[in-house]
Image (spheres, grey):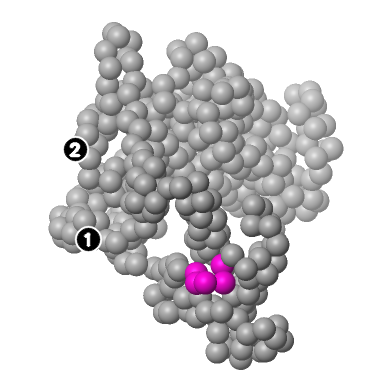
Amino acid sequence: MNKIWVILKREYLTRVKNKTFIIMTFLGPLLIALLYGGIILVATKDASDKTPRNVLYNDESGFFNNKLDSVMNFHFVKAPENRETALKKVSSGEFYALMEIKDKNISDLDSVQWISRKTLSLLQKEKVSDLLVNKVYSNKLKQSGLSQGMIDSLKPSTKVSMLEIDETGGIKSSSSGIKSGIGFALAMIVYMFIFLYGSMVMRSALEEKTNRIVEVIVSSVKPFQMMLGKILGVALVGLTQFAAWIVLSIIGVITITTLFGEKIASTVAKAPVAPGGGSQMAAEQFQQSGMMDMLYNLPHLQIITIFLIYFTCGFLLYSSMFAAIGAAVNQETDVQQFMMPISLPLIFGFFIAQSAVFQDPHGPMATIFSIIPFTSPVVMVVRSPFGVPISELLLSIGLLLATFIFMVWITGRIYRIGILMYGKKPTWKQLGKWIFIKD
């Protein structure tokens, strides 16, 4: 235990006293604050193109021949009968696009073509499609004897309030959007932290091998002790810098919010949004007085506890594998052949966090991958705001810790052989043999 502590202390103090570490500790929060300010600046600006765009349209059904209303910045003009003439007008830039409605029967608008020099965005395509569908829909209702006023009154405004029943049987306000956002942000931190500081462990092992320092070290320290001390030391470095970043980032974010808070509020209040659009929904949600209640009702203790556990254990697991790479290879150019297989489970877990968890955080896929050790550091963190059963947490944490200890043992076996190997590039087959070679 004393030898592990000596190695841990050496790894920690060597890096904490490094000028680069000190500079990045203070520069990191500044960059985060600038990023936050940039996001606010972009969010308060309307990114959509307001330039009027004249669009030719040709309707073979005859239904839209009277006139098509403008949508976004598109203004529709009846196209000339000669299709080649219309295409030349689009090609020359006189008109932005040509929309051809080839459907003879407007019951199914499945043969609409949009011809332009630039592809529409998803939002623009959706708005154009909605324009055609709503016009057909309104006409069918009018044919049933309904006036335009009656048709408009048939469209109800929708607002679904999320409520949860807590363990005591009480009802409290909730928000799936807030929980998803918090979970995703925390998962991103874990994901970035593992790659950032895991590679530090790998470079440390590679550096010692290159400098031949390890030849002296391994004569008095067991490989398992060496690896555990090195991994824990770098983990402590990361936690130190992360804690400093949190404190300094909070100060920076508060400062930015104080400077731009009034501008954000006025922009959200004045911003024109399309009825039923995502921007309007977000604005309305943030204007609701119950937003603070939703934040207050989150399971803060569980979220923070799960984050810290998986933040630390996830790093320990992956850094042990990164260390094995550093001990096996001779130079950084040889790292890539080993990095991909180790990185893929974590990357896959991040995609699971974005898809399965957001679709159903309590579903079987989210549950399974939050228990598997190689994906749980990211997936479980995303699930944490939604509430996770204690039994699943205990099983997941137990497997994660057991896998970490097992990987440290495997890494130690590779370390004792690979750290003394020079010149020849190792293969996966050789790494497997190193694990089972007797002392």
Residue lying at the far top of the rendered structure: 168
> How many neighbours does mark 1 have within 10 angstroms: few (below 14), some (14-19), or many (20 or more)?
few
Quick one: 306 or 224, which is closer to the camera?
Answer: 306
Indicate left or right for 131 with 303 as reference.
Answer: right
Which mark sits nearer the N-terminus, 1 or 2? 1
Residue at figure coordinates x 29%, y 61% from the top left: 272
Residue at figure coordinates x 56%, y 79% from the top left: 78
Residue of label 2: 289
Q: Main secondary structure of the magenta part?
A: loop
Indicate left or right for 249 with 62 as reference.
Answer: left
Whether 110 is among the magenta residues is no
Confirm whether residue 362 shows in the render: yes
Indicate left or right for 333 with 32 as reference.
Answer: right
> How many neighbours does mark 2 have within 10 angstroms: few (below 14), some (14-19), or many (20 or more)?
few
Disc sitting over residue 330 in the figure: none
Q: Give the image location of residue 335, x and y in percent.
A: 69, 51
The amino acid type, in three-letter code, at marker 1 is Lys
Q: Work out which quarter of the rendered image holds the C terminus and state it.
A: top right
Rounded to the nearest angstrom, the CA distance separating label 1 from label 2 is 18 Å
Extent of the magenta region: 64-68
Q: Are marks 1 and 2 in contact (CB under 8 Å)?
A: no
Q: Secondary structure at mark 2?
A: loop
Q: Give the image location of residue 200, x and y in percent.
A: 52, 47
Quick one: 308 or 350, which is closer to the camera?
Answer: 350
Q: Give the image location of residue 369, x and y in percent.
A: 60, 27
Q: Give the image location of residue 310, x and y in percent.
A: 47, 29
Identify whether 164 is placed above or below 111: above
Residue at figure coordinates x 32%, y 14% from the top left: 166
Residue of label 1: 270
Residue lying at the far front of the rendered structure: 145
Confirm whether residue 122 shows in the render: no
Residue at figure coordinates x 59%, y 75% from the top left: 57
